[in-house]
Image (spheres, grey):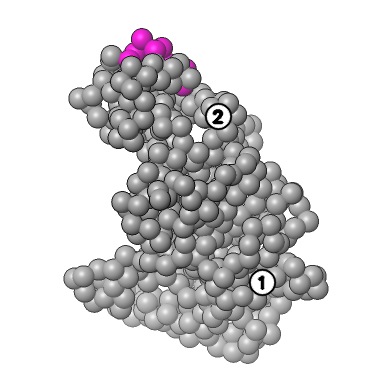
Amino acid sequence: MSVLDELDDVEMGETLLEVRGLTKHFQSDSGFLAGLFGSDSVEAVDDVTFDIKKGETLALVGESGCGKSTLARTILQLIKPTAGSASFKGIDLTEHSERTIRPLRRDMQMIFQDPQSSLNPRMKVGQIIEEPMQAHDMYTAAERRDRAKELLDRVRLDPGYYNRYPHEFSGGQRQRINLARAMATDPDLIVCDEPVSALDVSVQAQVLNTMRDLQEEFGLTYLVISHDLSAVRYIADRVAVMYLGHIAELAEKEELYENPKHPYTRALLDAIPIPDPRSRDARGTLEGDVPSPIDPPSGCRFRTRCPSLIKPSEYDLSDAEWDGVLAFTRAVQRRTFALEYPEEEEKEGLPVRTVSEAVNEEYFPDGRPSGPVSEVIDEACRSIADREWADAQSLVTERFEEASTCATDRPQYAVDAEHGSDPHRVNCHLYRETAIASGDASRIDESPRAADAAAPGETAQTGDD
Ligand code: SF4
């Protein structure tokens, strides 16, 4: 019996793709990474869980290197996962060999970012579109030719382009050819990896428009991968924000843009430029680099950049005092705290008092917190005065950042079902505390791993980060 016979019939609005605890860790054979980082495993995707319903568009958004493309390829089994499952129409793709699931590939197509390099320059447009139909033994040669011309028309290209070569087209037209090829086998799911990021802004909207029209006409389901939150707003129904291999937040589009909860999502949205030359609003920027997936941070993966890091419970600090301590910590870690070391004092460094006064003025204008916090700051100031920045960085990281629950505990998903028709899931201790305080058990999840996630439709879902 073919795997095609086992496929579930999926109606519009029902779950087409179910991803549970999907994980992909790449291993290095050389031991080189282990020598550098104490680990030879790159945690590209770790414990990702979500569903896609038939006919919807789910956008997967995050900075470069956050694992979005690896996740997409792992879902399609172009890369074999380390753990977890990806079920398409009820068939768990991870349980079958490539040979077994090959017939399913006609139902799951992919469009790549660069429309130029993804088209064979030696093939005519017609051949390019017919190739997947041929590979799956679909239609007669004459039918394939007719279908290729019809698809050109559907993606708003002249069917007369059938005998032309890819180099004769613009970037937007080439992406339309890619779209026609992806549609050739009449798929249910199209994974679009940065479908418009290589195109001019004016062309992006046209291609997205065509994608949306085709979706309406053929009931297509899209998984759209993008680094650009503003571009996917146009086409997405739901948005999953990904950071360092994890989904930080997942919600209905409008809910996510209007009511973002995860500090990372908020930072990404703050960074979107306002198209108004009169606006004087300073847009927020996300500070610091994305940590290496070879050695990801403990606890919450965003904690090394999070502006809302939770204050350590061992210190008795007001919120305002913690803001100052955190700002000082970040400035020391990134060495953005400006100090003028006079040249003649280069060897000796600066007087500690000078550094201490500058720190107080910059970060604690209303007075420095007393007790152990002040002692740590004093010690950091001494290291900075002696130009021993690495010592100061280790000290504030260990005593302040790593003392936070954000560093010691992995956040679990909290669920807000109050907004939108879908649950709004966020992977952050802050929101989880609010959910617990609400006394509503359905908003929190105690299960330890996303692999044990709740079934679709339930309001609580898991995934320790
Ligand atoms: S868990 Fe902590 S570090 Fe992570 S996003 Fe929430 S507040 Fe920030």
**Where residue 347 sits in the image (x, y, percent)?**
30, 78
The single residue placed furthest to the front in the displayed view is 1
Asked if the beta carbon under badge 2 is closer than 8 A to the nearest atom of ligand 1, the reply is: no
Q: Residue at x 59, y 85 (%)?
A: 373
* Residue 58 placement: quadrant: top right
Q: Residue at x 31, y 51 (%)?
A: 99
**What is the tally of numbered marks visible in this picture?**
2
Tell me if residue 303 is in the magenta stretch: no
Is 336 situated left or right of 248 in this image?
left
Q: Is residue 345 above or below residue 56?
A: below
Amino acid residing under circle 1: Asp
The single residue placed furthest to the top in the displayed view is 160
- Highlighted magenta segment, given as a residue range: 155-162
Asked if the beta carbon under badge 1 is closer than 8 A to the nearest atom of ligand 1, the reply is: no
Amino acid residing under circle 2: Phe
**Where residue 304 sits in the image (x, y, percent)?**
49, 68
CA gap, disc 2 to disc 1? 37 Å
Q: Which residue is mark 1?
A: 445
Q: Residue at x 51, y 79 (%)?
A: 402
* Label 1 crowd bin: few (<14), some (14–19), many (20+), radius 10 Å: many
Between discs 2 and 1, the one toward the N terminus: 2
* Residue 310 placement: quadrant: bottom right
Is 168 situated left or right of 299 in this image?
left
